[in-house]
Structure formats: C-alpha cells, structure tokens
Amino acid sequence: MSTTSGKPTRRPNVQGRPRTGSRVAAIQALFQSEQTGETAETVIDQFVRHRIGPDAGGYEDGRVPLADVPLFAELARGVARQSDGLDEIVAGHLAKDWTVARLDPVLRALLRAAAFELSSGTEPPARVVINEYMDIAHGFFSGDEPRFANGVLDALARSLRPDEFRR
C-alpha cells in the first residue's frame, strides 16, 4: 500500500529524535513542492510557520512536532537545487524497467533526500542514513515500499560511500 497524501500512514519512530523529524518534514515538503509547484523556499516557510513544532499537531495531520529546523531547511533546499543530479544517481540504482518518474512521489522524495545526504559528505555515517530513512519509510508505507527503499538505499550508500563498507 502506498501513500499519496504525503502524510505518514503510521507515526514514524522519532520520539526524541529531532534529526529524524527533520527528515520526515523534508520528505513532506518535497512532496508538497512537487505536487503544488511551489518553490522550496515557499514550502520551507510554510512548514516552519505552521507544521513544525510542539504546537503544530501530530503526524497524522501532516505535522512534525519535533524537528531540527536548520537540517530540515538544508535538506529541502539541497534536494530542490540538485534534483536533476539526484534523480540520475537514484535512477542508476533502480531496476532497468523502473524510472524515477514511475516511483510513488513520497518514495521519490525519500530517495532524493537520502541521495542528497549520502552525496553531501561523510556525516552522518551511511548506515545511520539508511536506518533513518528506513524508519521513515515504515512510517509512510505499509506495503513493499520499505523493502524496495532498503535495496535502493543500500546500493546508493555502497556506491556513494564505498569506504564505509570496506571495513
């Protein structure tokens, strides 16, 4: 089962994890930007003013009670700026009969955000990035999507950060 609302189907495991909350918010913002055509800056502003923070409401309402706002903004801006290159990276790790455009829009946002983090440096470690985005995938999807995401995330991490997997 996939989501087309950009809202988690279950509460993501983010209790006391503001960096994970940032990633959830970034995925939601990227989804919203793609669906509405609004710029990343417009969506970031909307999220910071109305959808992030303890008074924003709960995940089931498309809100993120706990998030590291600078990380959220960095992810949303970075993915928006580099989306074409990120799509090429992601496409290189999909099965031959799959395209980035064919992916569920939330899954596409998740894989773009993970590819951005993995290609932007060495922190956090690749295994942490994989675990974070897998927790989030399980919050958004209840079908085969998390398993699919795990395979792509693992391939992305091994390709973009090979030194971390030689140990």
Image (cartoon, rainbow, N blue to C red):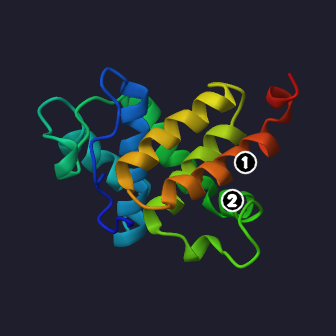
Horizontally, residue 33 falls left or right of residue 47, namely right
Q: Which residue is mark 1?
A: 156
| Residue neighbourhood size for the residue with mark 1, other residues' Cα within 10 Å, grouped as few (<14), some (14–19), many (≥20) | many
Marks 1 and 2, how far apart at CA: 7 Å
Foreground of the two, 35 or 42 = 35
Q: Is residue 53 above or below residue 101?
A: above
In the rendered image, the quadrant that contains the C terminus is top right
Foreground of the two, 122 or 138 = 138
Q: Residue at x 50, y 53 (%)?
A: 146
Q: Which residue is mark 2?
A: 90
Q: What SS does tag 2 mark? A: helix
Specify the amino acid type for callout 1: Leu
Horizontally, residue 103 falls left or right of residue 118, namely left
Q: Residue at x 36, y 31 (%)?
A: 69
- Quadrant of residue 54 in the image? top left
| Residue neighbourhood size for the residue with mark 2, other residues' Cα within 10 Å, grouped as few (<14), some (14–19), many (≥20) | many
| Pointers 1 and 2 in contact (C-beta within 8 Å) | yes
- Quadrant of residue 141 in the image? bottom left
